[in-house]
Amino acid sequence: MTDTPTCASEKTWHALVLGRAGLDLYPQTDGGKTKDAKEFTADMGGSGGNIAAAMGKVGTKVALLTTLSEDSIGDFVRQKLQACNVSDALLQTCQSNSRTSLAIAEVRPTDCDVVIYRNDAADLQLCLTDAIKAAVANCSNLVVTGTALISEPSRTTTLELMQHAQTNASCVWLDLDYRPWNWPDLQTTREIYRHAAQFSDVVIGNEEEFAVLTDDLEAYIDVANNGAAQQTILLKRGGHGASLFIQGNRLDTGVYAVTPLKPYGAGDAFLGNLVSHYHKHKDWQSAIARGSAAAAIVVSQRGCASAMPNTNEINLLQESSVMTPLPTWR
């Protein structure tokens, strides 16, 4: 099945990604603990930056919508975006004391500690501008990460851009991207997520994230698939693959087996490559397979943005390995 969402095919940008990007630090020794580290390696992280990097690495014309602090950390992120073929044309620079986020993440498949510093985060200062509105009107896909909805002015900017994208025939993809420590309480989060979901063509998340959106996922899917404004639901099941719900149909897919080095980065690789492939081919099954292959590659390597695979690397994995279990429509 290749139907929905319907996207304008000839636009300036294949995709725009709205969300955070920051600095990641990793203890130098694989398997080591942060408390024992003597050296660290650095990379760009953050869901928005990673998704955009995944797209840029496979040739998608993509830009990131975020705000960076005016300091060396912000400069680091800009350079990493450029290295991943992500345009920085729409980046904003924060003039206040807000800072680009920092994450310290262990490179371990289990018992992996990740500490994130987001006090007065720069990315939440994103403001609506005429340049961003014009770019969104000229993009085929707008990918929004849920952390952009945490506070103002980013929340209002994000919601207005989602509405603006739909008005201009751009597909809106909402990655729920739930981080509980960022939100005051479940009810507040649910209200804001539901508001954003109204302007989304595709909603993506794992079971924990969808539990924030609704107490009854089955009923939510039924309404989303069969309502007046049909919505596609993509449920990520980690090592068990993914389930796509579209127009009353369900596609269950598997994974590409690899030996994981770390548990993070897979979801961003998956979504970035899914959107890129679906934009080109309008085929859900092959797009999900493509995203799954990219996710497998990322969890088997150090880093996040730098670990995002290029087209040849994804081709090689798909040619040498089979997704298990095989995808099935029902």
Image (cartoon, rainbow, N blue to C red):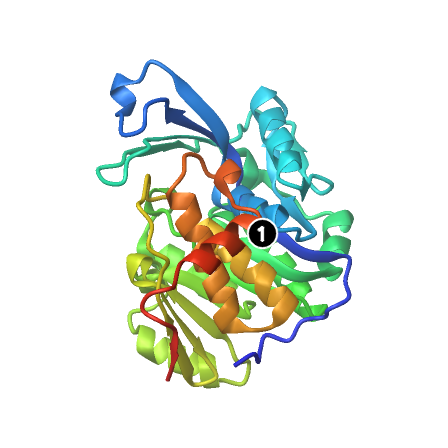
The quarter of the picture where residue 163 lies is: bottom right
Residue located farthest toward the top when viewing the structure as drawn: 38
In this rendering, would 310 be left or right of 107?
right
Q: Residue furthest front?
A: 320
Seen in the image, is 268 located left or right of residue 93? Answer: left
| Drawn side of residue 94 relative to residue 10, left or right | left
Is residue 70 placed above or below 171 in the rendered structure?
Answer: above
Q: Quadrant of residue 29?
A: top left
The C terminus lies in quadrant: bottom left
- Which sits in the foreground, 118 or 291? 291
User: Disc 1 on helix, strand or loop?
Assistant: helix
Residue, x 53% and y 28% (percent of image)?
A: 99
Identified at 48% across, 39% down, the residue is 307
**Residue 23 horizontal/vertical position (percent):** 49, 29
Q: Residue at x 28, y 35 (%)?
A: 108
Residue 24: x and y, percent? 45, 30
Residue 195: tell me if it is visible.
no
> The residue under label 1 is which amino acid type?
Thr
* Residue with the mark numbered 1: 311
Q: How many marks?
A: 1
Q: Nearer the viewer, residue 12 or 219?
A: 12
Tell me: residue 263, above or below residue 190: above
Which residue occupies 60% across, 59% down? 276
- Is residue 98 in view from this perspective? yes
Q: Is residue 275 above or below residue 91?
A: below
